[in-house]
């Protein structure tokens, strides 16, 4: 069954995509196997019709594109990051010299209490000393196994816990890493020693790191009918997978198709590797210049282009139906979601919606239209942000999920296949 094939592939992608850096690394491997050639942003490009290319942007973002016939432009965007916990510099904290903890801060907007009592691991990148100071050795790492946990306070010591307790980010969300043996003490630099041992490097060679704590829990197919997926990081690996699969395969009669996997959406996108930068527009301009187009032609193709921004949507909650809009609900296993809001925090416009609807109708792809309640602040995606630099017809689309930003989210297994089918047809 095609739906379950997509879910099994998504499970593997989620397991490999534990932070923005490993998400990009996994995407590179898939694209390379499909014939994509790596380019460097700061070099002159020699491009060919029928070619497939990709650019790594500071290790945590990726742009890939294919060049078919003509110059018409289609773009698909998603983000590589997810709400989680970030390890601070000089992170070692000790308690009575017996316990070792890591000083952390919250990245994005996770549901904090869902991170308690979970098996947690670490992924990210580390910079090591090199002969050339301007080219430090960069290592992308994923420890994979559980190395941390954030223990709850027992109900006997916190009798009001089931009435709702606000968690202090600097006190309650500090991960527990190590307990010393009887008669011993935790060393002051226990984490740096652990990290150096993992890297098989000298502790003094570690210059800096960007390390994120993630939930090690395995994705699981669930539900009486086996048609739900409970998993970490569905926001936004569902979209990353759809874009990667959509751009792979024969270039054929396509024009110029682009996928942009941005970092830092969960904290506002205002980074060099985020959607709120000129990076994507610069890459697209370089594509047209390398193909011999003039700047005026490039601008014409951009203004006449299409963009789909992919991110998850808020599914109708079975226990809190009052949180949904009166008429614009979306349900798990009922197809993709086209997201609309008057505030334009979603980039969707009427013209692009009509295009997507017709693609869905002609190809038997189920879809739903969604809007937030008028008395609730709407979420936002990177579509509107990217549109600042590339003004073109746009739409925000995704799969519906429950428990968005939880350490585990829930989706309908059939919806992933619908999303992947749409993106494949969109690019073709």
Image: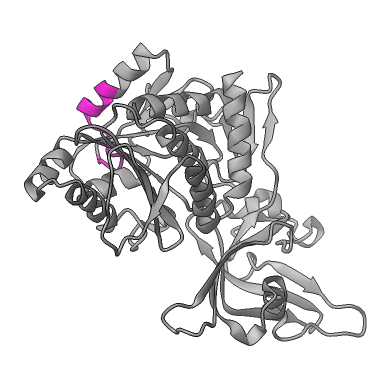
- Is 353 magenta? The answer is yes
Q: Quadrant of residue 276?
A: bottom left
> In terms of depth relative to the viewer, which is nearer, 45 or 371?
45
Residue at 65% in and 66% down = 172
Residue 102 to residue 350: above or below: below
**Whole-percent x, y for residue 342 in the image:** 24, 36
Q: Residue at x 89, y 78 (%)?
A: 181
Quarter of the C terminus within the rendering:
top left
Say whether residue 263 is visible: yes
Residue 132 is situated, as x and y percent measured from the top left of the image, at: 45, 84
> x%, y% of residue 219?
67, 40
| Quadrant of the frame with the N terminus | top right
* 410 shown above or below 214: above
Of 391 and 203, the residue lying toward us: 203
Stretch of the chain drawn in magenta? 343-355
Q: Nearer the viewer, residue 77 or 83?
A: 77
Q: Is residue 72 magenta?
A: no
Q: Residue at x 58, y 36 (%)?
A: 10
Q: Residue reaching furthest left?
A: 296
How many marks the image carries: the answer is 0
Residue located at (33% from left, 19% from top) = 359
The answer to whether residue 401 is left or right of residue 91 is left
Relative to 409, is 186 on the left or the right? right
Q: Is residue 283 left or right of residue 6?
A: left
Work out whether 197 lies above or below 274. below
Residue 294 appears left or right of 69: left
Q: How is the image coloured?
A: one colour
Considering every residue shown, the one lying at the far right of the view is: 182
- Does the rendering let one see residue 329? no
| Residue placed most toward the observer, 70 or 239 | 70
Q: What x and y, as percent, mark residue 358?
A: 30, 16
């Amino acid at each position: 069954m095609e739906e379950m094939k997509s879910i099994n592939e998504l499970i593997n992608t989620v397991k490999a995509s534990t932070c923005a850096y490993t998400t990009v690394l996994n995407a590179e491997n898939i694209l390379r196997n499909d014939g994509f050639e790596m380019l460097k942003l700061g070099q002159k490009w020699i491009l060919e019709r029928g070619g497939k290319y990709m650019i790594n942007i500071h290790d945590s973002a990726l742009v890939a594109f294919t060049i078919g016939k003509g110059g018409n432009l289609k773009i698909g965007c998603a983000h590589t990051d997810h709400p989680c916990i970030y390890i601070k510099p000089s992170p070692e904290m000790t308690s009575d010299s017996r316990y070792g903890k890591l000083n952390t801060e919250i990245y994005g907007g996770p549901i904090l209490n869902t991170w308690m009592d979970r098996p947690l691991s670490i992924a990210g990148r580390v910079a090591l000393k090199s002969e050339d100071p301007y080219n430090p050795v960069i290592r992308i790492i994923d420890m994979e196994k559980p190395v941390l946990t954030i223990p709850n306070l027992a109900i006997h010591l916190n009798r009001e816990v089931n009435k709702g307790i606000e968690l202090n980010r600097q006190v309650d969300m500090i991960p527990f890493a190590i307990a010393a043996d009887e008669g011993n003490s935790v060393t002051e630099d226990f984490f740096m020693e652990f990290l150096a041992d993992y890297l098989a490097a000298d502790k003094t060679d570690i210059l800096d790191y960007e390390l994120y704590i993630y939930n090690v829990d395995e994705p699981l197919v669930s539900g009486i009918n086996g048609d739900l997926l409970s998993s970490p990081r569905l926001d936004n690996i569902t979209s990353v997978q759809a874009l990667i699969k959509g751009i792979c395969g024969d270039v054929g009669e396509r024009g110029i198709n682009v996928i942009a996997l941005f970092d830092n959406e969960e904290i506002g996108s205002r980074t060099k590797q985020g959607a709120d930068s000129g990076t994507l527009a610069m890459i697209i301009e370089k594509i047209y210049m390398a193909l011999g187009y003039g700047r005026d032609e490039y601008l014409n193709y951009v203004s006449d282009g299409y963009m789909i921004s992919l991110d998850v949507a808020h599914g109708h909650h079975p226990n809190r139906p009052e949180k949904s809009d009166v008429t614009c609900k979306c349900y798990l296993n009922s197809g993709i979601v086209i997201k609309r809001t008057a505030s334009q925090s979603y980039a969707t416009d009427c013209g692009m919606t009509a295009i997507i609807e017709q693609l869905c109708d002609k190809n038997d792809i189920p879809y739903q239209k969604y809007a937030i309640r008028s008395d609730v602040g709407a979420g936002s995606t990177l579509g509107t942000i990217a549109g600042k630099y590339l003004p073109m017809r746009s739409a925000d689309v995704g799969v519906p999920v429950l428990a968005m930003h939880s350490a585990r989210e829930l989706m309908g297994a059939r919806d992933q296949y619908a999303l992947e089918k749409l993106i494949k047809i969109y690019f073709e």
